[in-house]
């Protein structure tokens, strides 16, 4: 893993932007995108740049089950606000949280990933070591699946909703196996609350207890951290 420690989120945004810029220069056609607060400064840099995504495809990691694309906390909506409105892609895929048929939706999404192999996958990191919504215990070979969110993830994401009761209990997420198929991975983490998960991801044993630890098995991973997130390395 190529670990870069930066001073703050703004510097992380610039460092992350460079990874995207280089991937595009090398011909990347499919970008795997992520939500959460962490990628925001990278998206700001992408929006401010003269990079053109109009011939590219994006594939997002995950979506809450039960939220439609117009819901302000849906990941569809997040992506529109933070990137797609300013920088439209030729085609953008996000799991459909309104599809109650989990088997059909996860199969549809796996087919999309198969047809659009991801050149660069951006990831945030959960405080419990999750990537996408792959909670501790997830099968490392998993493909897209329906996930029951853990209490710690519900609590961590409650800040985006009026209260914890409104946080959806399920999500559709690419699996750990789907993520590891990407040719290149960029994972970003900021803040003290992520420090233990970062240390377990980079230095800990490779274990389903820490889904991000499987990134150690991938040949091309860049990790961008601020000093607080790197403090237990
Ligand atoms: C959510 C998302 C993850 C994200 C994580 C961390 O659970 N499903 O993809 O990485 O939260 O979020 P944040 O970047 O806001 O800390």
Image (cartoon, rainbow, N blue to C red):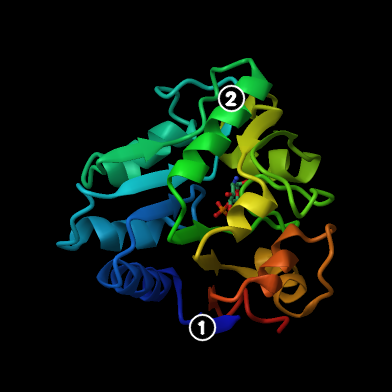
Residue placed most toward the observer, 25 or 168: 25
Q: Quadrant of residue 86?
A: top left
Residues marked 2 and 1 touching at CB (< 8 Å): no
Mark 1 burial class by Cα count in 10 Å: few <14, some 14-19, many 20+: some
The numbered mark at residue 194 is none
Left or right of 1, for residue 23: left
* Element class at badge 1: strand
Distance Cα–Cα, label 2 vs label 1:
36 Å
For residue 161, say whether it is visible.
yes
Q: Residue at x 84, y 50 (%)?
A: 137
Q: Residue at x 35, y 38 (%)?
A: 92
Which mark is first along the chain, 1 or 2?
Answer: 1
Farthest residue in the top direction? 100
Mark 2 burial class by Cα count in 10 Å: few <14, some 14-19, many 20+: many
List the residue tagged with mark 2. 105
Residue placed most toward the observer, 193 or 110: 110
Q: Quadrant of the N terminus?
A: bottom right
Q: Quadrant of the C terminus?
A: bottom right
Q: Residue at x 70, y 72 (%)?
A: 217
In the displayed structure, would residue 188 be above or below residue 161?
below
């Amino acid at each position: 893993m190529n670990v870069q420690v930066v001073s703050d989120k703004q510097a992380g945004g610039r460092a992350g932007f460079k990874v995207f810029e280089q991937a595009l220069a090398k011909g990347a056609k499919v970008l795997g995108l992520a939500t959460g607060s962490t990628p925001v400064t990278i998206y700001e840099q992408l929006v401010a740049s003269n990079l053109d995504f109009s011939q590219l495809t994006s594939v997002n990691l995950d979506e809450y089950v039960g939220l439609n694309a117009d819901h302000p906390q849906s990941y569809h909506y997040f992506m529109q606000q933070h990137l797609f409105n300013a920088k439209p892609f030729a085609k953008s895929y996000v799991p459909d949280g309104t599809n109650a048929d989990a088997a059909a939706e996860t199969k549809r999404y796996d087919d999309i990933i198969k047809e659009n192999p991801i050149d660069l996958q951006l990831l945030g990191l959960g405080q419990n070591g999750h990537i996408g919504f792959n909670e501790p215990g997830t099968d490392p070979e998993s493909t897209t699946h329906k996930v029951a969110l853990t209490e710690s993830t519900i609590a961590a994401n409650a800040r985006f909703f009026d209260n914890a009761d409104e946080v959806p209990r399920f999500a559709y997420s690419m699996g750990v196996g789907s993520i590891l198929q990407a040719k290149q991975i960029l994972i970003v983490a900021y803040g003290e609350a992520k420090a233990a998960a970062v240390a377990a991801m980079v230095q800990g044993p490779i274990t389903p207890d820490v889904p991000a630890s499987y990134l150690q098995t991938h040949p091309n991973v860049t990790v961008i951290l601020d000093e607080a997130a790197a403090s237990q390395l």
